[in-house]
Amino acid sequence: MARLAASLCLILGLAACGDGRDIPTSGADLPVYDGVLSTREAKHLFGAERGASPQSPQVIGGYAKGCLAGGVELPETGPTWQAMRLSRNRNWAHPVTVDFVQALSRAAARQPGWQGLYVGDMSQPRGGPMLTGHRSHQSGLDVDIWMRPADRLTLSRAERERLSSISLRRANGAYTNGSWSRAHHEIIKAAASDPRVARIFVFPGAKARMCADETGDRAWLRKVRPWWGHHYHFHVRLECPRGEATCVAQDPPPPGDGCAEADEWVRNILNPPPPDTDTPPPRPRRELTMGDLPAQCAAVLAAR
């Protein structure tokens, strides 16, 4: 790591590795870097960082191609939450995300049988591509919330490695199973009702169930999007923080509550359409390199 830091400092200039709290706001403000660092898989560089950069908090790039300056750590345990799988060191995020998680955990603690939340993966200390797992979670604005009710907030570090969440799906995700509760509905509703939230990903059967059960205001359902997996946890994605021009937002969800789309997902799970033989198979995704990320991400790695 010392050699990596030294190399980055030489590439970016001494100013980027000094005590400055802010980073450039455009690629034009940074020296061009090339060679081994631009072609090396970025996940190895970001995955090796154990702490945040000493910079002002800033989201750089997008959810699946970006990084995080000045990240903050969600405390491992709080009054209404516990961070899980601490060995992964993924309980870091933008301060707005940390505040959101704490607020949602307080709402969850008001549900019967829940003392708060078990919080899964957020981001690495400096964001960026992860060594394993997620393609997103790179910019400090994504967080996975376990579906398992947090009924005990005194779990040891070892218990947090061994304990697993619970699956709520039935029939390959077309329906919810017996572990689904009204509390799950209300917690996801509370998350989607937060104006900072852009999207929530859940398995199709959960979205369809919430559409069927909601009798009040349905506007929040627009943010809840069906997606594969997401039956052990739901994935919350926040909007770009106000005033952060380096953050790349996702297009907003389509108008409406999205319930017809969820029903279509369910129908396709139960009766899969025939495969389209004219569609070529998808190409394997290649790993992102530093050259794929915004130029400012090199400064985030170099900052000491």
Image (cartoon, rainbow, N blue to C red):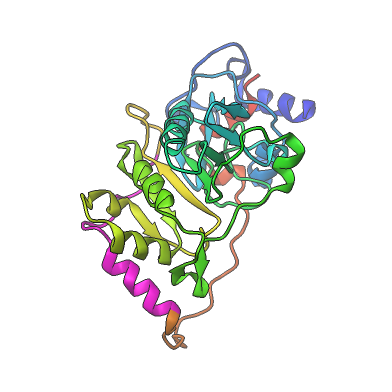
Between 216 and 87, the one lying in front of the other is 216
Provide residue 291's location: percent of width, then percent of height. Answer: 58, 44
Q: Quadrant of residue 297?
A: top right
Between 196 and 38, the one lying in front of the other is 196
Residue occupying the point 37% across, 61% down:
207
Residue 148 magenta-highlighted:
no
Residue occupying the point 21% across, 56% down:
255
Residue occupying the point 57% across, 36% down:
127
Looking at the rendered structure, the number of numbered marks drawn on it comes to 0
Residue 268 magenta-highlighted:
yes
Residue occupying the point 74% across, 47% down:
162
Can residue 249 be seen here? The reply is: no
Indicate the quadrant containing the C terminus: top left, top right, bottom left or bottom right. top right
Indicate the quadrant containing the N terminus: top left, top right, bottom left or bottom right. top right
Classify residue 155 as left or right of residue 180: right
Between 257 and 156, the one lying in front of the other is 156
Provide residue 301's location: percent of width, then percent of height. Answer: 63, 30
Provide residue 155's location: percent of width, then percent of height. Answer: 68, 36
Between 271 and 156, the one lying in front of the other is 156
The residue segment tinted magenta is 248-269
Classify residue 82 as left or right of residue 4: left
Classify residue 221 as left or right of residue 246: left
Q: Quadrant of residue 108?
A: top left
Classify residue 136 as left or right of residue 201: right
User: Residue reaching furthest front?
Assistant: 112
